[in-house]
Amino acid sequence: ETVYAYGMHLLPGVIDAHVHMRDPGGTDKEDLRTGSMAAAKGGVTTILDMPNTSPATVSQKLLEEKLTLASVKSIVNYGFFMGATIDNIGELKKAKRTPGIKIYMGSTTGDLFLKDPAMLEAIFAETKLPIAVHAEDENIITKNFEEFGLTRNVVDHSRIRTPEAEASAVRKAVALAKEYKHRLHLCHMSSALALAEFEDHADLITAEVTPHHLLLNESDYMNLGTLAQMNPALKSAADNAALLQALLDDQIQIVATDHAPHRYEDKCQRYPDSPSGVPGVETSLPLMLDLVAKEKCTLEDVVHWMCEGPALVWDIMEKGRIEVGYDADLVLVDMNKTMAIRGPHMQTKCRWTPFEGREVTGWPVRTWVCGKEVYREGEFDVSRPGIEVMFEHSRGGYWAGIDG
Ligand code: NCD
Ligand code: ZN
Ligand code: ZN
């Protein structure tokens, strides 16, 4: 088939290395079919999904059950993290078919918060797979934002974790990574204070940032209320700028969404009944392309942060069932298309977005997974499942990937 693409750009498919597709156990919010369709629409051809599902992904058996679910439901390629608990280190040691181990250093959606510092250290000491952390210190949670004068859907800001909480957990994780020479990935960095806790040496420590931590800040609480409740919490405009600079400086290697769909009704409850997290898999590429349109970064930067970076950070190699040739995960984007982001137009089951009404320039229009077109201008082909991603951890991380 000839593809006419005058005036458009063909990019590698986006790898979203941090999503929560809620499958199994939370499929009223999202599932691997609706979430992967949202991904395809957003130009995302590979998703790495987090373990805080019900049941949580904490054993090889449960991980392989998720892989089986995805093999029939996901229209994009997929991989699944294994969650750490107080008593599953045996499973973590022998885990396979996974990008790595996810540790929650503070509480968030689900019940995977690893409270015990001795177990945290044991996992760094005794396991081999890369470790991804949600770095927020449970004990440092106080900040008073009452000066924002919130009235509607008030987030109880006295309970919001501060930059200090993030910096403290990052400091602990970084110390353990250095002591045990263990590959560490810092999920969803949100503050300049946390960035000051680690240097740029990506062979050991890598980091990610979400579009919402780059583009939203505390001033958005006024409009969004609990819709903007998330972990880590939004910080200041100065933090937004520091995070973009960290990407440009390669201290942060990847943009991932932390796609955390919650039902709109649930998000509109009063804190603390309102859950934390925002959807994002469908809007990340347009939001980042809009930064290109605004000349804050280049199209090459976006490809580095959303395609190449995640492949290198997670040692993603050629895919499973491809027998001959190289797989083509591609997205065609129209840099001349300007359109407002609208929740009701979205594919994700939750159909709301913290970016409601934002006009952005640069939109994905067609997406191919393994050479097969799965999305074209509003139409999906769901007859072609994505495939399991393979991870080559033996090569030893980010720079090994570049050299090799
Ligand atoms: C995430 C979720 O809802 O699964 N929530 C969030 O606020 N980010 C979990 C997480 O990544 O911490
Ligand atoms: Zn998290
Ligand atoms: Zn997350």
Image (cartoon, rainbow, N blue to C red):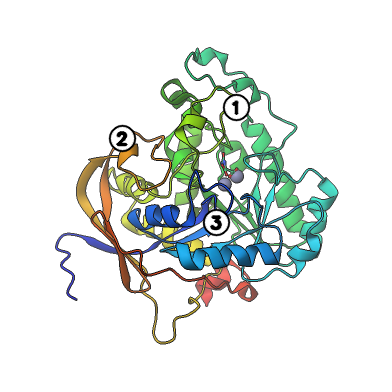
Q: Is residue 227 left or right of residue 369?
A: right
Q: Quadrant for the N terminus, please.
A: bottom left
Mark 2 packing: few (<14 Cα in 10 Å), some, or many (20+)?
Answer: few
Label whose residue precedes the other's in the sequence (2 or 1): 1
User: Where is ligand 2, by quadrant?
Assistant: top right
* Viewer-side residue, 255 vs 346: 346
| Three-letter residue code for mark 3 | Asp
| Three-letter residue code for mark 1 | Asp
Residue where numbered disc 2 is placed: 358
Which dot, 3 or 1, sits closer to the camera? 1
* Viewer-side residue, 219 vs 223: 223
Residue shown at the point (48%, 80%) measured from the top left: 321
Residue where numbered disc 1 is placed: 273
Q: Residue 69: x and y, percent?
A: 53, 63
Residue where numbered disc 3 is placed: 49
Label whose residue precedes the other's in the sequence (3 or 1): 3
Give the distance between the C-alpha atoms of the residues marked 2 and 3, in whole angstroms: 27 Å
Residue shown at the point (72%, 57%) measured from the top left: 177
Which dot, 2 or 3, sits closer to the camera? 3
| Three-letter residue code for mark 2 | Arg
Q: Is residue 118 left or right of residue 50?
A: right
At numbered mark 2, what does the secondary structure look like: helix, strand or loop?
loop
Residue shown at the point (65%, 50%) measured from the top left: 133
> Within 8 Å: ligand 1 and the Cβ of disc 1?
no
* Viewer-side residue, 84 vs 211: 84
Q: Residue 171: x and y, percent?
A: 71, 44
Visible residue check, residue 194? yes
At numbered mark 1, what does the secondary structure look like: helix, strand or loop?
loop
Q: Please, is residue 309 above or below residue 257 in the view? A: below
